[in-house]
Amino acid sequence: MNSAVELLVVGTSTAEIERIAGKLKTRTGYQLRTASGPVEARARIAACPAERLVVVALRAERRTLALLEPRDGYPRVAMLVLLDRDDTAATVRALNAGAIDVLVESPAVLDRLPGTIDAVLAKWRQRRAEQLAIDYAARFGHILASALTEIYTFDAATLRFIRVNRGARKNIGYSKQELRKMTPLDLKLAPDRERFEELLHPLRAGGQETLRFESVHRRKDGSFYPVEILLQFVRVEPPAFIAVCLDISERKQAEEKLQASEARFRSIFNVAAAGMAILTPYGEVLEVNPAFCAFSGFAAEELIGRNIADVTHPDDREATADYYAALRRGQDPIVQIDKRYLRKDGQVRWGHASVACLSGRDRSETYCIGLVQDITRHKEAEAKRREAYAELDAFVHTVAHDLRTPLTPIIGISEYLQEHAAEVLDRTSLDFLADIEKSGHRMLALLEDLLTLARVGHVRQPSAPVATRRVVDGVLKSLAGPSAGAGIKVEVGELSPLCLPETLVSQLFDNLIGNALRYAGAAGKPIEVGEERRNGQVIFYVRDHGPGIPEEDLGHIFEAFYRGRNARRVNGTGIGLATVRKIARLYHGDAWVEATPGGGSTFKLGFPLAALTGVGNPSA
């Protein structure tokens, strides 16, 4: 007897309930409850799981039988009806309502009641399980019939289709009637009956429960599409096969695109001029291309499985480990670094390494792609350039010192004569002495700035813009002799202030205006100095109307010590225009020359507008 069974005795007569309950109290293994009427009985039923409850109903009254409330083909609870006398109509009524059994009360019946209760509960459970199975099968059948996935059942002997669901019929285009006369061979699941039977043999023999493979289906309209098939043998009568087919057209297209993409990557990987490597996030080499093998001197099979640290210079291994750690943490999506590599022959090569970490569908598929460009020659040239700069710096210091040495007595003597010989010298002589002193101080300041320029790349930016017009006027005053001797007039327009060192602004216009005076041509045609704004730049220009620059000289005019065809008849060193371009480019500007309409040349200096105020730090 099931110790978890609960008995609920339901009746309308208190005496009857107590009589039956009294007989059952002596029985062990039950939890006995009573209810005097259907209302109280409903509350009791609601509080107890149906699978371990048996209702003992005294009388087959309709209100009591209503407690059964049949649902989906089986009664809500297991009910045993006890009648006080034989009543055929009541028995039929109770059984039709869903009662499991109807008995007429007698001493023998009451003695067998425990066994009867167990049988009633077992029968109710069986009836419910059968009904649930029927319902499940019906629902499952409906789901299969409605599913968009293709589902086929076919006879194991004849191979004719038994049932084909709606999803399959819709995709292949055949009707139910047409499919009843067809077999899987008609859909080209296999090329012929013999080979298809070989495919089915492991399922028939019980060696495999299921079989999964890919094939191609042919629709009624003659078109084909790829499918993945899950085949199962069902040992029913008669035996049958169930095939679940998934249209994998989109997957195949994606696979083809992926294969094409991988082929393109493989082609690039193998023919790339730069070294490429695929590595784990810890630097273990998975694959290398021929260019990396040529760079490192190792064969691919010698590198695969080793750590990239093994071919890294010892002094750069710690930095290499650090950037792989940063990639693993996701701190940097890509790392770029110049590092040294050790070739198989012991040589050291410099490489510019770019390494990116790529994530797969899960963390176990994460890998890194490294690109290495050989920059050994660049590094060697850079070292030679630094050495040359060091030598140039020493040379500049020496020259500057040698030039400053004679300037000191020149400035000192001119100051002494102006102070102590003013009474014996005429005004012209005193003016000449003043010009000598001023020129000496100007040259000394220029030497200091050029020395700084050669040493650090730029002169300190002034705190306030320099009045460009005032600087140009000073340049014109110093060039007054040459311009007056040539009979050339210099016209100066409005010029914006520049936030550049004054000595360098003076050097720019001194070179450009002096160059124009040397090549201005016949007297009467003025030299024009002005500015214009274009494309976010302020452009200063010095325009002359001389013979112009020959076409073959235009590409070289700003090269140091270059002397063009027209320059051979004019004194000069060929360094002035080179100095102009160097100064302009150091401050994010540039210098160029254009032909002047009607003849001549126009030299231009372009600076970003930020150079007018210093905002944006144009000298950085």
Image: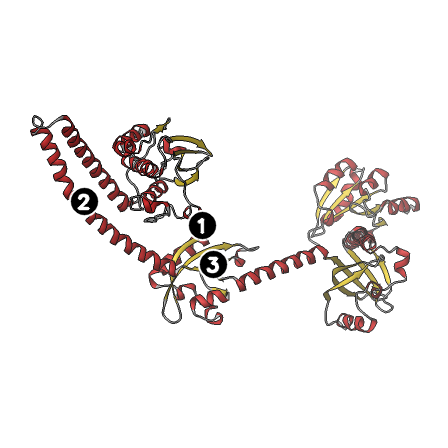
Q: CA distance from mark 1 to mark 2?
A: 53 Å
Helix, strand or loop at label 3? It is: strand
Between marks 1 and 3 in the image, the one whose residue lies nearer the viewer = 3
The amino acid marked with disc number 3 is Leu
Helix, strand or loop at label 2? It is: helix
Mark 2 crowdedness (10 Å alpha carbons): few <14, some 14-19, many ≥20 = some
Mark 1 crowdedness (10 Å alpha carbons): few <14, some 14-19, many ≥20 = some
Left or right relative to 401: residue 387: right
Q: Quadrant of residue 156?
A: bottom right
| Image quadrant occupied by the C terminus | top left
The amino acid marked with disc number 2 is Leu
Would you name the residue on which mark 2 appears? 403
Would you name the residue on which mark 3 appears? 371
Residue in view at x 34 percent, y 48 percent = 563
Helix, strand or loop at label 1? It is: loop
**Image position, residue 426 (x, y; %):** 12, 27
Q: Is residue 409 visible?
A: yes
Sequence-wise, which precedes: disc 2 or disc 3?
A: 3
Which residue is nearer to you in this view: 171 or 598?
598
Would you name the residue on which mark 1 appears? 332
Above/below status of 212 relative to 139: below
Q: CA distance from mark 1 to mark 3?
A: 16 Å
Which residue is nearer to you in this view: 152 or 246?
246
**Image position, residue 110 (x, y; %):** 80, 51
Does the CB distance between marks 1 and 3 fall below 8 Å? no
